[in-house]
Amino acid sequence: MAFTENLSSVDGGLKSELGKKGIVVATLNELYNWGRRSSIWPMQFGLACCAIEMIATACARYDIARFGAELFRPSPRQSDLMIVAGTVTKKMAPQVVRLYNQMAEPKYVITMGACSIAGGPFIDGYNVLRGIDRYIPIDVHLPGCPPRPEALLYGLMELQRKIDGQTIEKTEWYQKGLKREYPVPECGPHGLIPKFNPEVWAPREVDHRKERYGEPVLIGKKDKAPNLDAPVAARPAATSASSASQPSAS
Amino acid sequence: MTPEEIKNKIQTALPGTALKWVRDTLLIENPQDLPKVANFLKTSEEFRFDYLSSVTGADYLQYLEAVYHLYSMEKKTGPFVLRARVGRDQARIPSLVPLYRGAEYQEREAYDTYGIIFENHPDLRRIFMWEGFEGFPMRKDYVQEDSEILEASDIEWLEKHQVQVPEGMKKRAEELKKQGRRAVAERPGQPEPQ
């Protein structure tokens, strides 16, 4: 993740010395980012089992309120952060993109868990989208299946670091020509149309999964089926374990 | 009761139904007999299978099957498993919704994924996949799309929505269109023999 250092004109040592005397020195930029990163309101939005971990993060034990992100908003218009928590099916993907489009700037996205990053264990399914990054830009990829609440908190802290690196003069949502609405895909006869948005995502040039693991999941046409009418093979004798132990005893 | 006794009981009550035991499950040779048999199992004093727990589709290449798991809440027995076999091309089985209301969504699911048509079903639509989806994805001859390659319809859609598409992708889609092919996942369907 690319973020730039916060270039403050007052050096850190002097600032902390002044702080001990009760004098606070800050740039407008710091105050602005401090306010924004301490009140990231996530969208109340869960798709699968990762949502359970998100709920655990919001509860008392892990307490996401320590980071100012406890206010889960039920409307995209009021939220800053979308946590895509769970498997995005092809039927759900258009709604996720539409919700992203409806969020107000500045908006951030965390993909939580293997499914929303790349399809996870369901990558070869006919019904699962291989990663929501095919349609919308992502700020923090958070791997895990599902990630523990600590991991989600770490993802949130990474996002806060990213926010700290942004400057008020250069923030893109005050610039002209910012396009952060993406066309909502449609359900077609064989899957989603389009399969991905080339402005956001492009297929990998090298398929590392295939190199490393071959074709572990078989999704082509199948021409084998069990024959139910054949007699059931007799179960191996229950005495095989005892008979195996006998030679060693003798 | 032994399996043979159960079979004989059903056949004496409903003469003319062909039944066969297949691995602890009762195969109904003519699927049109299914509501009769299920009705008998539900209402007869000896069985009282009043709860249909699941309706499953299955693909055995030569034929499709619907598998029904029946339980008796009254007698605390079950599962009692019924099978109905149909050909791939005319997969039509009478619906059990008039007998068991809970079969409605499960039959819709079997229709959605295997393409088994349940006759007299009150509302036979797709349930998981969307309207307009083609094919039945759990059948063994279903071929998935290749989700890494854009097709002509994708390019057209993207250009309609003012999205820049790289030239390489456009070229590939045109080639596919010229050959009249879809981009399908050309991946093995069976493990290689070792």
Image (tube, rainbow, N blue to C red):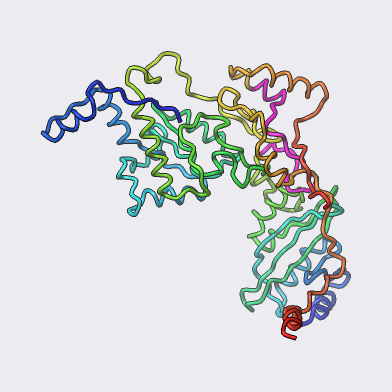
The quadrant holding residue B46 is bottom right
Magenta segment includes B5: no
User: Residue B5: horizontal and vertical position, in percent?
Assistant: 81, 81
Residue at figure coordinates x 68%, y 75% from the top left:
B48
**Magenta portion: prevailing SS class:** loop
User: Residue B139: horizontal and vertical position, in percent?
Assistant: 77, 48
Split into 4 quadrants, where in the image is the N terminus of chain B?
bottom right
Of all residues shown, which one is farthest toward the top? A176
Q: In this view, does B139 lie to the left or right of A65?
A: right
User: Residue A115: horizontal and vertical position, in percent?
Assistant: 56, 43
In the figure, B79 relative to A176: above or below?
A: below
Q: Is residue A171 left or right of residue A9?
A: right
Residue at figure coordinates x 36%, y 34% from the top left:
A160
Q: Is residue B106 left or right of residue A95?
A: right
Q: In this view, does A225 lie to the left or right of A5?
A: right
Of all residues shown, which one is farthest toward the bottom? A250
In the figure, B56 relative to A211: above or below?
A: below
In the figure, A247 relative to A125: above or below?
A: below
From which residue to which does the magenta span run?
A: B131-157
The quadrant holding residue B169 is top right
The residue nearer to you, when weighing B85 against A26, is A26
The quadrant holding residue B165 is top right
Of all residues shown, which one is farthest toward the left? A21
Report the label total: 0
User: Residue B127: horizontal and vertical position, in percent?
Assistant: 64, 47
The residue nearer to you, when weighing B158 against A220, is A220
Magenta segment includes B137: yes
